[in-house]
């Protein structure tokens, strides 16, 4: 069985596709920038826009995907302006709805490009890593529509919560059925849980401004979008979790986390986890090294 963590430890560039709901929050922008600015470890082949559903999308999955698509381009422009040696990467629109059931994909540009890249550049021994930091609709749809890619890709997904938390989580809530379709597939999966694991990636605006503000247009933009999140009651102390850098850092530096193997779960309608429902194992990150990850982030963004 292909072990994602062991494969990531190999001293070679990893081919990745980044699937991101970039406009949903302020953390995807950091993750996309980090991926673009880590050419020694990562060959970023494509970026795909994932859907989301909240007030920033007017509670419409399609608008969430489209606004994420636009934000991907905006962030790429800031990265390329700040680091002239970096070239933009092709990016594509994704799904506009949730999967209706585990056997019915939502077709999109993202599904087709995941299939194309997997078949052209992935092998069972040298896989394309699909790093997903939003609802897993695009990736699960590709696996359902083209099951032959399962032995050419490995999925690194930020979603669900640590096994000792359980319950709903935003990316999981975005498409529970797609999550089950992913775990039902034969693709290797490394899950990066949110509460209890990625929730350790806390920073503050003063820390970000110390490292990034005034250093580049990208640094100023990242500080600006975080500053806009200041709570309205103006507390003396507030912080943000930069969730999405966890999945990208796992690919760049697998020494930043510790994982275990678990049976593959089905997530039921009541958000309970039915471990062992699907055949096989998946890897579940248990701990992250917060300081190691932020040190890496700041060194790349400067």
Image: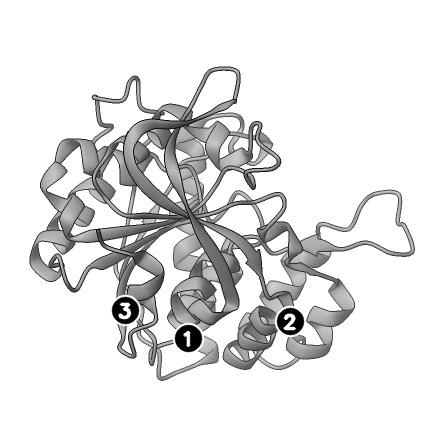
Rendered image coloring scheme: one colour
In the picture of the structure, the residue carrying the numbered disc 2 is 291
Q: Estimate the x, y position of residue 216 in percent, counting from the top left.
A: 57, 79
In the image: residue 236, left or right of residue 71: right
Residue contact at pointers 1 and 2, CB within 8 angstroms:
no
In the image: residue 117, left or right of residue 158: left
Q: Estimate the x, y position of residue 144 in percent, counting from the top left.
A: 19, 31
In the image: residue 131, left or right of residue 192: left
Q: Which is nearer the eye, 115 or 283?
A: 283
Element on which disc 3 rests? strand
Residue 238 sits in quarter: bottom right
Residue 148 sits in quarter: top left
Q: Estimate the x, y position of residue 200 in percent, counting from the top left.
A: 65, 56
Which dot marks residue 14? 3
Q: Which is nearer the eye, 134 or 52?
A: 134
Q: How far apart are the alpha carbons under marks 3 and 1? A: 14 Å
> What residue sits 45% from the left and 57% below the top?
247
Element on which disc 2 rests? helix
**Which of the two labelled residues, at mark 3 and mark 1, occupies the earlier sequence position?**
3
Residue 65 sits in quarter: top left
> What residue sits 7% from the left and 58% below the top?
120
Q: Which is nearer the eye, 149 or 223?
A: 149
Q: How far apart are the alpha carbons under marks 3 and 2? A: 23 Å
In the picture of the structure, the residue carrying the numbered disc 1 is 37
> What residue sits 69% from the left and 69% below the top?
208
């Amino acid at each position: 069985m292909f072990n994602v963590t062991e494969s990531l430890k190999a001293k070679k560039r990893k081919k990745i596709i980044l699937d991101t709901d970039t406009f949903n929050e302020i953390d995807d922008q950091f993750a996309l920038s980090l991926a673009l600015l880590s050419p020694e470890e990562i060959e970023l082949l494509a970026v795909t826009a994932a859907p989301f559903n909240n007030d920033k999308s007017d509670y419409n999955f399609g608008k969430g995907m489209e606004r994420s698509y636009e934000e991907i381009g905006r962030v790429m422009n800031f990265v390329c302006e700040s680091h002239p040696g970096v070239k933009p990467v092709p990016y594509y629109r994704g799904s506009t709805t949730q999967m209706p059931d585990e056997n019915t994909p939502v077709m999109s540009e993202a599904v087709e490009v995941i299939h194309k890249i997997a078949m052209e550049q992935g092998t069972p021994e040298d896989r394309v890593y699909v790093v997903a930091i939003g609802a897993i609709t695009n990736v699960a749809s590709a696996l359902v529509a083209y099951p032959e890619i399962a032995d050419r890709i490995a999925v690194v997904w930020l979603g669900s919560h640590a096994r000792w938390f359980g319950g709903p989580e935003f990316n999981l809530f975005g498409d529970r059925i797609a999550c089950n379709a992913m775990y039902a597939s034969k693709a290797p999966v490394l899950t990066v849980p949110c509460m209890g694991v990625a929730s350790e990636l806390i920073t503050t605006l003063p820390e970000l401004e110390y490292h990034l503000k005034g250093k580049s247009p990208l640094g100023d933009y990242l500080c600006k979008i975080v500053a806009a999140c200041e709570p309205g009651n103006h507390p003396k102390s507030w912080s943000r979790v930069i969730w999405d850098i966890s999945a990208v850092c796992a690919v760049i530096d697998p020494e930043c986390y510790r994982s275990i193997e678990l049976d593959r779960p089905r997530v039921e309608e009541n958000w309970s986890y039915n471990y062992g429902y699907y055949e096989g194992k998946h890897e579940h990150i248990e701990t992250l090294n917060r300081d190691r990850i932020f040190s890496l982030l700041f060194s790349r963004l400067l």
